[in-house]
Amino acid sequence: MPYESLDFTHLLKHPTTTLANSYIIRKALIRKHYLHNTITSWWSKHPNDTSLKGHVPLTVGFEVDYAEFLDEALVECWELKESWEKDEREWWVLKPGMSDQGQGVRLFSSEEELRSIFEEWDEPDSEDNEGVETPPAINGQDVIGAGTMTSQLRHFIAQRYIYSPLLLSSHGKRKFHIRSYVLAVGALRTYVYKDMLALFAPLPYTAPGASSSDTRSTASDNPIDPRAHLTNTCLQDGSREGSVVRFWDLPEDADNLPYHWKNDVLEHICRATGTLFEAAAREQMIHFQTLENAFEVFGIDWMVDEKGGPWLLEVNAFPDFKQSGEALKAVVQGLWNGVVGVAVKGFFNPGAVTEEGIEEERFGMRRVLDVDLGRR
């Protein structure tokens, strides 16, 4: 049932007989700027925890209403300023904190490029601009409406671009990300569904700015084709055939990686996911409120680097299952079989799933977190 249709008042009044397919509040995970705060808060209190460190790109958060206020917004963005002062050009990914399906995602490597992005978004739609071609943010996608992006979505993050992604010869050296499905149950058990997806960009990968011999040339001098960098299939025109495959169908002999590299990726994802949900539940209790009579399925995206290390990109509520396509419907069907078996039957018949490991054996659900938050 869609989030907007859920009767949370009824849910709270009937904690033992009513089960919902969503928590009430979970923006600590699904809003990009809140996710950044969740992770940094956890790191500050658990400096020796390595399950997330090394798996999250350097991220800077800031708020800006209009391009004219960008200078003020960047006052404390030290990482960005240090990057811009380097001789070697460094790339960053700009993401609106509350957008989804890749909308508004841009690449930039300098303050001038970042400013031009916001100035473009500030331009109002008018009849004077009819016939004037403005480049879309991504192939086939507008930037959520010119003139409304910064005024309505004031929270942004900038993530350091992940260089040297894993490129597979069997898939045309195209960049890809992994979509893992995560089931959160009650308050709180968390599961990673082992059958994951790999989503590929439509064009072969080339590093941003690779065609330029000038390390400080602008993006306008060397236009970047986002189809080589952004792997969200929502942004792809035409046929998506070959853009989505089962993760476990990827070749064992990936370039320069051991044959068990896929198992290693899964283990990393499981550890990081467990820590991530515990961080949200313990450090952001206002912004992630679990309930014993609720469960939710999340889609988490990961980029894999050339060494086989997964990097957390974002967490999505109510993930778009159309990305799997017709050929991979069995993946989604298997996921929901597990959701019913673990979350639904487990609620109405607590004895149905009692021991850790049964969920994985029966439904492919790996339990990665089991904590009692004392919420009844």
Image (cartoon, rainbow, N blue to C red):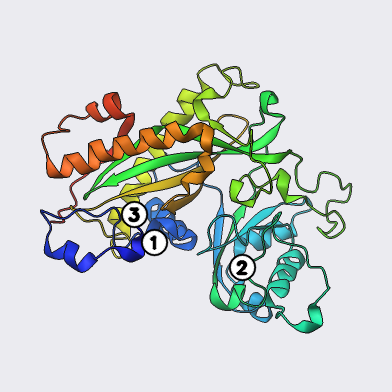
Q: Is residue 340 above or below residue 214?
A: above
Mark 3, other Cα within 10 Å: few <14 / some 14–19 / many ≥20: many
Give, as a three-letter code, the residue at label 1: Lys
Sequence-wise, the earlier of marks 2 and 1 is 1
Residue in front for this viewpoint, 372 or 4: 4
The span from disc 3 to disc 1 (Cα, nearest Å) is 9 Å
Are the residues tagged 2 and 3 within 8 Å (C-beta)?
no
Comes first in the chain, label 2 or label 3: 2
> Does residue 293 appear left or right of residue 159 in this picture?
left
Q: From the top left corner, tell me how far across and down residue 169 is, in percent.
A: 70, 24
Residue under numbered circle 2: 144
Closer to us: 169 or 84: 169
**Residue position marked by numbered label 1 in the rendering:** 27
Type of amino acid at the residue the image marks with label 3? Ala
Q: What element carries label 2?
A: loop
Mark 1: which secondary structure? Answer: helix
Q: Can residue 51 be seen in this view?
A: no
- Return the residue nearer the eye: 337 or 52: 337
**274 to 214, vertically: above or below:** above
- Say which quadrant the N terminus sits in: bottom left
Mark 2 → mark 3, Cα distance in angstroms: 28 Å
Which mark is drawn over residue 280?
A: 3
